[in-house]
Amino acid sequence: MPKADHRSNINKKNKRKIGYNIKWILMISIWTFLLAIFVSLLSENLMRSLGLLTATIVLNLIILLGVIFDIIGTAVTAADERPFHSMASNKVVEAKYALKLIRNAGIVSNFCNDVIGDIAGIISGAAGTIIVVKVISLYDFKNVAAISVIVSSIIASMTVGGKALGKEFALQKTNKIIEFTSKILMILDRKFGIDLLPNLKKKKKR
């Protein structure tokens, strides 16, 4: 009987986890759709009012934002709980948030790598188009296709190159990145009452 009860408890936990995952997938899909529309419209309207130099700086910041979130997503999936258990035993407050990050690695990496990454890609593409229009109008270039291809290629190379470097950095400085991110989560929770992640228990090995 105890074995049957144990299996029943495991099945219930698995069902709850599956239910939570489905809920997360639906919620993040809807939020991504709404965020992509809102941010695209906002950024496009803002970019049109900026000069060429300022628009280029904003584009670089958007690419950098995507790289930073990609670093966090990579670090979370590569992180180990053990150093943070040690920090928690020494009463380091942010260790609790670090453990939440690691135990929610799937959610965090999905949000950082996919949601923010895709939105940054959409915005940088729109920003690139606006920069092409500004370059053509300022310098009276006739070959629109060539300018468009060059700008798109620069954006793509900066994004891919930045993320490649970011992944190397994330794998080398995993714990430092988790510590820094957990401090941000702690501030959001304690100062603003925003608790972004559920408290998941560590998986027990069978």
Image (tube, rainbow, N blue to C red):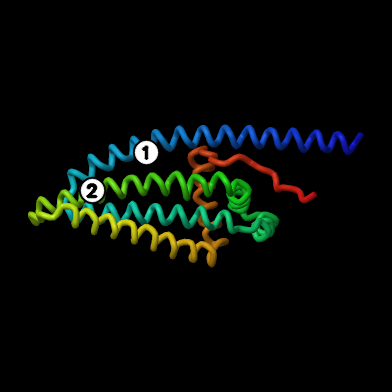
Distance between mark 1 and mark 2 Cα atoms: 17 Å
Q: Nearer the viewer, residue 175 or 26?
A: 26
Q: Kindly identify the amino acid type of the residue bearing the numbered disc 1.
A: Ala
Report whether residue 29 is seen.
yes
Horizontal placement of 165 versus 200: left or right?
A: left
Where is residue 57? Give x, y as percent: 26, 56
Q: Kindly identify the amino acid type of the residue bearing the numbered disc 2.
A: Thr
Q: Nearer the viewer, residue 176 or 13?
A: 13
Farthest residue to the right: give it. 1
Label 2 SS: helix
Look at 41% across and 56% down and name the residue there.
67
Which residue lies under the disc numbered 1?
Answer: 36
Horizontal placement of 190 versus 205: left or right?
A: left
Look at 55% across and 36% down and name the residue there.
24
Q: Which mark is residue 129?
A: 2
Of the image marks 1 and 2, the number of the one nearer the N terminus: 1
Horizontal placement of 166 versus 88: left or right?
A: left
Label 1 SS: helix
